[in-house]
């Protein structure tokens, strides 16, 4: 790209720039829905003749479920909430040139931290119990992000490897704690104690709890941090060119540790919100794929907090609408996992999409996908 | 050799036009290359040489124009097509695989098969040896390319072209990384190639005296157009420079008298390890005074990079001490040094000096971003950053459409001006310049050199490291020569002899006087 072209792009109207940024993700979602439609059509053959209208019905139901009612919309928003935080936990790391696969573990540690402290403070006044419970989860998540950050900075251990290991370790720790020290008596199954006053307040009769507001409020905060603060400049410089960062007097090792801790904090908050606001307790094998979906969200949102918010709402809508789709169209909710995987596949073929759409890469900007693809094996100790 | 050819030109490019959005990179360029001719292509960065060669090599498609080879029109779709037609390109940055052997590198992409499964190793090795012998470079086909010197790696590239029976050999800035002696050897090889095999050579360079020495004909390109064609006998450096830049050019910086004052930088017995932990600087001592330029000459890879990184705080010393104005900076960080008044233009602007994906604004404050007025606490001040960037762009004449374009979209010369503007634009005690003009066009070199002299005259101590001996000779007041991690000599630049320094660079002066004598004789003969 020439400088002149770069200027033209930089000065294009905001809407144009947004469209250019959103083009590839939009095509990825559209492509995934089309391939998903083919799969849905084919699946109709299991119970009768090929039904070409079935996908339209299924998607229609899904849309109706997600946006057709106030309740649906609120459910969409609530479903998007942990994905926004998790997505930012992965996206922020991308900006520092790190591939945080550990959002899952950080989420779980955040969840168990707030479940434990929340239950312990169940009798305390809500004004104290809630902030402390949330903070405990966030900090435990941050600690779970700090570890791979420090390992990378001090020993050069690659974060992809360490975060995957820490995910497994987090799962095992929760299994131990919830069947052992943290198990609450008097239930028919292993779970943590009753939250009492630590439970997050929610709007009357909805799933919109305090954590939802926190997540949406953090979107502009993280954006500001990245693009308007000196710390964000350091994070982005380390991500774009660690050698230049050293030359500029920055400390890539410290930035790596700090960024991973912040990522852990965000994912930990997601866990805290889910436990304190939605599930209200932790079980030994807390089933969730939020940490992994966060990776898709961060990629779909191009590691931009607002993009991540949009991507999380898309995923949240699918999740919220899938129930109605299953009831009305008889398509199992698992189809949305298929569609999400297809989205990722389309994103990974970014180059192909660009060629089809005849759009060139924005700039030399190292994008998230590069971090993913170069990630393993090329990491140098910072 | 350059008389009217009996045969049609080996290559003819007629009316080649290539437009990119906003620029015409090639505007009806005509170029003809005769059999057995060394044809120099001269032009500033961004003049359109690379585009033209990319078109020839099938990497770009022309919007208009024809390519004829031996009188026949051809279309070159991709590099394989070009190679099949006998066009070979030796890039400035060698395209060799360091962990593979010489033979493997040469065969790569065109592997001779003994049968459908196995390579015909023996036959290919024999042919490589034979080619090497014929052109006076016996190279072991089994040697790992990574273990060869830069000069030998280049020969491997040329061998690769010969192996593929190239009729047109394109060399992009082939001498940028060579010592004067190596350059002369390569020139001898090129002459032999053209006279014995009738190979045509397209020689891209910005070193005017080299072009005058080696070329049969010279074509000068400026802003996408051919602005002149010359025969060396009928031109000189000034004429070529003027054609290239389009105005009078001051080829040698007017350095004037230096007035050194107090000792500013002192290095005592400095030892440094490379990334693998091997000691590559073995106890180097020198000092630089305020108001003087101390140049360090040396073939790339003799420890200069590591020494510079140590002085600028990017690398730890393993022994010795360094002081700046009497204060120890042996363990100082880049930020400490920046605060103490160190300016540093790193050798690799893509690696250290710039973040190519960031806008010019961010690059201008790359190492000042955390201080007033560019930020207060955590909050960045975009207005102050923009004001500073605009001032730099004006003062250093950076050609850019705006302050917000990514640095990577500017030409090399303008990128370097951004680095120079950032590092020169404040009060300095010491300025460290590592290859400050590598890969830049004449106009930018002239500009940067005059800025360096200005800084020296203002009383800044300057440490200059360059693999370009000419640059060291031109700017320095005193010259040190690095060889295998040691400073083998320090000479006064006014009395320095280019040949002698070249020899010191190549041998460290550690061979016997007789050998030196015979080598010198050999060199004289060669030239």
Image (cartoon, coloured by chain):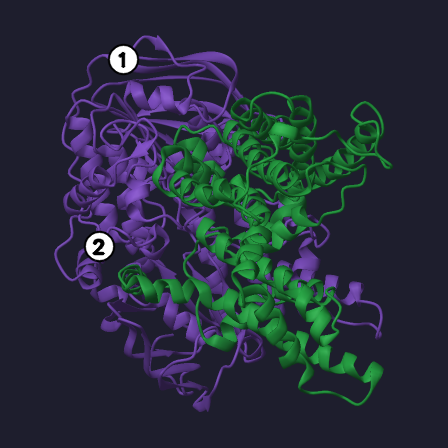
Q: Nearer the viewer, mark 1 or mark 2?
A: 2
The CA distance from mark 1 to mark 2 is: 37 Å
Query: Seen in the image, is B444 located left or right of residue A35?
Result: left
Location of the N terminus of chain B (image quadrant): bottom left
Q: Secondary structure at mark 2?
A: loop
Query: Looking at the picture, does residue B432 appear above or below residue B391?
Result: above
Sequence order check, earlier mark of 1 and 2: 1
Q: Nearer the viewer, residue B23 or B208?
A: B23
In this rendering, the answer to whether B5 lies above or below B1 is below
Question: Residue B455 placed where, x, y %?
Answer: 19, 30
Query: Which of the 4 quarters of the picture holds residue B257?
Result: top left
Residue located at (18% from left, 56% from top): B238
Q: Name the residue located 45 percent from the left edge and 75 percent from the top edge.
A: A358
Q: Residue A117, labelled with which disc?
A: none
Q: Colour of chain B?
A: purple
Q: Position of residue A134 (x, y in %)?
A: 57, 30
Q: Nearer the viewer, residue B194 or B23?
A: B23
Q: Nearer the viewer, residue B249 or B17?
A: B17
Locate residue A225: give its quadrant.
top left
Q: Which residue is mark 2?
A: B399
Tag 1 and tag 2 share a subunit: yes
In the rendered structure, find residue B263 and report the number of the disc placed on it: 1
The 10 Å Cα crowd at callout 2, few under 14, some 14 to 19, many 20 or more, is some
Task: Give chain A's shade.
Answer: green
Disc 1 is placed on an element classified as strand
In this rendering, position of residue B231 left or right of residue A363 = left
> Contact, CB < 8 Å: mark 1 with mark 2?
no
Q: Residues within 10 Å of mark 1 (few under 14, many from 20)?
A: some
**Is residue B252 at all visible to an observer of this figure?**
no
Q: Is residue A196 left or right of residue B525?
A: right
């Amino acid at each position: 790209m020439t400088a002149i072209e770069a200027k033209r792009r930089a000065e294009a109207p905001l809407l144009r720039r947004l469209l250019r940024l959103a083009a590839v993700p939009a095509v990825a979602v559209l492509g995934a829905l089309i391939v998903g439609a083919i799969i849905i059509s084919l699946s109709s053959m299991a119970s009768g003749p090929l039904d070409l209208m079935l996908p339209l019905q299924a998607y229609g139901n899904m849309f109706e479920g997600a946006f057709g009612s106030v309740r649906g919309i609120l459910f969409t928003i609530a479903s998007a909430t942990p994905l926004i935080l998790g997505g930012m936990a992965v996206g922020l790391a991308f900006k520092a040139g790190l591939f945080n696969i550990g959002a899952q573990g950080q989420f779980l540690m955040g969840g168990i931290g707030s479940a434990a402290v929340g239950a312990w403070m169940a009798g305390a006044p809500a004004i104290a119990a809630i902030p402390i419970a949330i903070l405990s989860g966030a900090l435990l998540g941050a600690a779970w992000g700090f570890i791979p950050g420090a390992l990378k900075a001090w020993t050069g251990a690659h974060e992809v490897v360490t975060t995957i290991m820490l995910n497994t370790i987090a799962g095992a720790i929760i299994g131990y704690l919830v069947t052992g020290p943290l198990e609450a008596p008097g239930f028919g199954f292993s779970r943590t104690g009753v939250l009492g006053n630590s439970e997050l307040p929610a709007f009357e009769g909805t799933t919109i709890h305090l954590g939802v507001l926190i997540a949406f409020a953090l979107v502009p905060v993280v954006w500001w941090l990245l693009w308007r603060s000196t710390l964000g400049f350091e994070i982005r410089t380390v991500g774009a060119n660690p050698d230049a960062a050293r030359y500029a007097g920055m400390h890539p090792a410290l930035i790596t540790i700090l960024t991973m801790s912040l990522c852990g904090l965000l994912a930990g908050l997601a866990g805290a919100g889910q436990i304190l606001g939605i599930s209200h307790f932790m079980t030994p094998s807390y089933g969730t794929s939020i940490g992994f979906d966060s990776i898709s969200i961060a990629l779909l949102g191009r590691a931009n907090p607002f993009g991540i918010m949009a991507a999380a709402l898309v995923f949240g809508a699918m999740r919220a609408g899938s129930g109605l789709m299953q009831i009305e169209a008889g398509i199992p909710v698992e189809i949305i996992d298929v569609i999400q995987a297809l989205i990722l596949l389309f994103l990974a073929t970014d180059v192909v999409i660009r060629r089809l759409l005849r759009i060139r890469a924005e700039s030399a900007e190292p994008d998230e996908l590069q971090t993913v693809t170069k990630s393993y094996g090329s990491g140098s100790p910072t | 050799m350059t008389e009217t050819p009996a045969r049609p030109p080996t290559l003819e490019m007629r009316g080649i036009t290539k437009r990119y959005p906003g620029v015409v990179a090639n505007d009806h360029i005509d170029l003809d290359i005769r059999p057995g001719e060394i044809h120099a292509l001269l032009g500033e960065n961004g003049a359109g040489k690379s585009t033209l060669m990319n078109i020839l090599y099938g990497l770009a498609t022309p919007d208009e124009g024809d390519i004829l080879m031996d009188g026949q029109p051809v279309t070159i779709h991709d590099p394989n097509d070009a190679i099949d037609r006998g066009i070979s390109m030796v890039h400035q940055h060698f395209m060799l695989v360091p962990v593979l052997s010489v033979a493997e590198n040469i065969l790569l992409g065109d592997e001779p098969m003994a049968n459908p499964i196995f390579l015909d190793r023996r036959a290919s090795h024999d042919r490589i040896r034979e080619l090497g012998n014929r052109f006076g470079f016996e190279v072991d086909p089994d040697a790992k390319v990574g273990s060869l010197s830069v000069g030998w790696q280049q020969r491997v590239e040329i061998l690769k072209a010969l192996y593929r029976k190239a009729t047109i050999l394109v060399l992009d800035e082939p001498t940028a990384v060579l010592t004067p002696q190596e350059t002369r050897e390569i020139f001898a090889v090129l002459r032999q190639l053209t006279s014995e095999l009738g190979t045509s050579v397209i020689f891209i360079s910005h070193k005017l005296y080299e072009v005058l020495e080696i070329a049969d004909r010279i074509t000068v390109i400026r802003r996408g157009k051919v602005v002149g064609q010359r025969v060396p006998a009928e031109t000189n450096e000034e004429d070529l420079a003027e054609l290239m830049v389009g105005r009078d050019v001051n080829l040698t910086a007017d350095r004037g008298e230096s007035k050194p004052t107090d000792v500013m930088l002192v290095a005592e017995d400095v030892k440094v390890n490379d990334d693998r932990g091997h000691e590559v600087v073995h106890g180097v001592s020198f000092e630089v005074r305020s108001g003087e330029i101390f140049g360090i000459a040396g073939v790339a890879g003799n420890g200069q990079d590591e020494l510079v990184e140590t002085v600028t705080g990017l690398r730890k010393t393993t022994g010795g001490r360094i002081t700046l104005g009497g204060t120890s900076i042996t363990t100082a960080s880049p930020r400490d040094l920046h605060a103490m008044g160190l300016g540093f233009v790193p050798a690799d602007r893509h690696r250290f000096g710039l973040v190519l994906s960031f806008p010019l604004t961010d690059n201008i404050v790359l190492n000042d971003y955390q201080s007033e007025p560019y930020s207060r606490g955590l909050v960045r001040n975009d207005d102050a950053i923009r004001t500073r960037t605009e001032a730099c762009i004006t003062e250093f004449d950076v050609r850019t459409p705006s302050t917000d374009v990514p640095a990577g979209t500017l030409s090399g010369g303008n990128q370097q001006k951004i680095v120079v503007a950032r590092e020169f634009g404040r009060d300095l005690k010491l300025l460290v310049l590592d290859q400050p003009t590598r890969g830049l066009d004449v106009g930018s070199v002239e500009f940067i050199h005059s800025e360096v002299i200005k800084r020296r005259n203002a009383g800044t101590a300057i440490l200059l490291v360059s693999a370009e001996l000419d640059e060291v000779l031109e700017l320095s007041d005193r010259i040190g020569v690095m060889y295998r991690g040691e400073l083998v000599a320090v000479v006064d630049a006014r009395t320095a002899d280019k040949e002698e320094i070249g020899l010191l660079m190549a041998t460290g002066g550690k061979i016997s006087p007789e050998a030196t004598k015979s080598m010198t004789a050999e060199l004289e003969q060669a030239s």
